[in-house]
Amino acid sequence: MAREFVPQIITSNHLIEGDSIYLTEAGAWSRIAADAMLLANAEIAATTLATANLQTDLHVGAYLADATHFRETFRAVGPSNYFHGKQAV
Amino acid sequence: MYIYNDFDEEFVRNRVDQFRDQINRRISGALTEDEFKPLRLMNGLYLQLHAYMLRVAVPYGTLNGRQMRQLAYIADRWDKGYGHFTTRQNIQYNWPKLNEVADILEALADVEMHAIQTSGNCIRNVTADHFAGASADEFEDPRPTAELLRQWSTDHPEFTYLPRKFKIAVSGAAHDRAVVRAHDIGLYLRRNDAGEAGYEVVIGGGLGRTPMVGKTVQEFLPKADLLPYLEAVLKVYNLKGRRDNKYKARIKILVQETGLDVLKARIDAQFVICKASFKGVPDSILAPIEAAFAPPVFNNTRSAALDDALSNDPLLQSWVDTNLAAHKNPAYTIVTVSLKAVGQTPGDASSDQMRVLAALAEDFGHDELRVSHEQNIILPHIRRADIPQVYARLREAGLATANIGLLSDIIACPGMDYCALATARSIPVAKEIAVRFNELKLEQDIGPLKIKISGCINACGHHHVAHIGILGLEKKGVESYQITLGGDATQNMVVGKRAGPGFAADEILPAMERLIGAYLDIREDNSETFLDTFRRLGDAPFKAALYPVEEAKNAA
Ligand code: SF4
C-alpha cells in the first residue's frame, strides 16, 4: 500500500539574504512560513516544485517539505541561541 | 607571524575580484545555482538554514591583534556582531548577505586573510597545535611546516579536484593538542637518534561516518623529504581514492580497503619518483618562513606581582589553576581564554570581546593570538607578572571563565541551530549541561572531562574522541542523542564506544547527570579522572547508570 501523503509545502532560501522563504497560493514567495501553500497531493507538489525551480534568480534550492518537521519549525523561527533570524523580525 | 609576500597578496586580491564578478553574475541571473555553487564553495561561502555562512581561514589558528580587530569589524559591519570559532581553528560568520560577501573578503584581504580552501575537495586549511611556539613540552614549532604546506597546497593544480576534502595537522610537542591522528595526514615533528629533525607521518585518520585512528606510515621522515613524500601520498590517493561514493572517498577508506602495507608500498614507489624530480625547497622560500616564526623577544624580568595577587584573590587562583599552561620561558605563561561562559554558545565571541582579545595581545602578548580546535582563544605569550592585569580585563569582558579542560569546556558544532546538514541541535544541549552542573557546583570536583557534541554524523564536534561524546540524530521525527564513552583525542587516540540507544532531547540532561553521578560514586578517589575510571572498569557501570530500567529488567 502506498504511504499516505503528508501535506507538503514548497520552501527555499532567498538568493541574497539566504533566509527561508515559502511559496504561496498566489505563486509568490513569502518570508513567513504560515503563508505557505499546502499541497495535498504528490502530483501537484511535484509539478509546482518544478515550476518554482525555474525562477532560479530569486531563490536557492527549493524543496518539498513537511511543515511539521522540527527542522522546518527551526527554519521558520531562527536559531535557539540568539534572538536572530525570523523571530526577530 | 608570516607576512604575505607580493605573490600571496596578488593571489588573494585577484580571487576577491573574480568572486565579486561571479556573485554579480549570479545575482543578475547569468549564472545558475548549479554553476555558482562550486564557485562559492571555493570561497568558503555556504548556504545554511537561516542564511549564508562564510568560513574564514585562520591558518594554523594564528592571528595577530590587527586581524582580530578586523574580524570584529566585519562582525559589526556585515554580520550580527559576533563570530563563531570552529574545531578547524577557523571563524564562521552566520549571517552574511550574498551581495556583501565580496566586500567582506576585501576587508579580510586588507589584513592578509581569506576564505580560500575552507570548503571543497581540496587540501583544507592546515591546522596545528594551538600552543605552538610557546609550550614547555614542545621541541619544535609546527607552524613553519604548516606554512610551508599552506604555500605548497594553495591552489595546487594537481590537488584541486581530489576525491574528497583533505585535512592535514601538525604537532611538535610531547602532548598532541591538535588531534593529529584524526586527520587525513598527521605530522608529528620528531628527532632521530642522531638529533636530526624529521616527521612521524600518520595517514588515514578521520572522524565522521566511519571514525578511524590514523596509522603511522613513516616512523621518521627526514625533514627535506616532506614535500615529495606528501606529494606521493596525495598522488596515490588522487588516483586510487574512490570517487564512486562520497562516503567512501576519504583516504581513511583507501587505507582500510587496500591495507596499510600495500598502500605504503605504493606510496614508497611513488615517493622514489617524486623525490628524483624534487629539487628541494629553495632557501628564498624557507628562510622567510623560518624567520616569520622566530620566537618573540621575551622580557625575562621576574616579579612577585602574580604571587601577591594570588594570595588574596581566590577567583584569580581558580582561573590560574585551570586556564594557564606551562610556557617554554619560565617568566611567561600560556593563557587559554575560555569561550565557554556558562549558558553561552561554545566558540562564540562578540565583536567587543574580539577587540579586548586583540588589545590584550597587543599590550601584553607579543601581538599573538591563537584559535584552538576546542573553540577557545589562546594568548600564547603572557608574562606571569602581567597576569593580574590581563585577568582583570578579561573579567570585565566576560572572558574569565575558569573551566579549561573541565566539564563545561564543551565542544559543540553549530548543529541544527545553523547547519543545513544537521540532524539535531547541539548548542542547547551544551548550554543545558553547562548550566545544570554549574548549579550543582560539581565541576571542580568532577575534574578533567571532555564532552564533545556533534549535530550529525559528520562529527565536526569530534564526539567520537570525547570522554563523553554526544551525537544528535533524528529518530522518528524528533531529536535523539546518542552517547559514546571513553574516546580520547590525544596521541593515544581512541574512538569512543556507543553506550546504547539514544535519548530524547528532554532525557539527555538527566542521562548525563546519572552518568557523571555514577563516575563520582565509583571512582577510586578524586584524583582518578572520568577517563581513568572508564578504563579501569569498562563501560558496564556507566551503561547501568544510563539505562537503569533495562538493567532492572535484565536482573529480573
Ligand atoms: S557535525 Fe553535522 S551538524 Fe555539526 S557542523 Fe558538522 S555537518 Fe553541521
Image: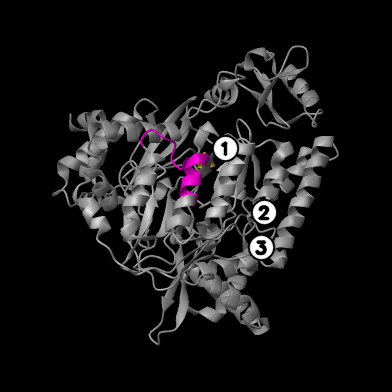
Q: Position of residue B465 (x, y in %)?
A: 39, 51
- According to the picture, the residue beneath numbered tag 2 turns out to be B110
**Mark 1: secondary structure:** loop
Amino acid, disc 1:
Leu
* Residue B421, disc: 1
Position of residue B30 in the picture relative to residue B49 (left or right): right
Q: Amino acid at mark 3?
A: Thr
* Tag 3 and tag 2 share a subunit: yes
**Label 3 – label 2 distance at C-alpha:** 19 Å
| Residue ranking furthest to the bottom | B194
Mark 1 Cβ and ligand 1 under 8 Å apart: yes
Front disc: 1 or 2: 2
Q: x, y (%) of residue B309?
A: 24, 51
Q: Which residues are magenta?
A: B342-358
Mark 1 to mark 3: distance in Å?
Answer: 27 Å
On residue B154, the disc is 3
Q: Callout 3: helix, strand or loop? A: loop
Residue B310 visible (yes or no): yes
Question: Residue placed at 16% from the left, 48% from the top?
Answer: B526
Q: Earlier in the sequence, mark 1 or mark 3?
A: 3
Mark 1–mark 2 Cα distance, whole angstroms, equals: 32 Å
Task: Name the one closer to the observer, B141 or B401.
Answer: B401
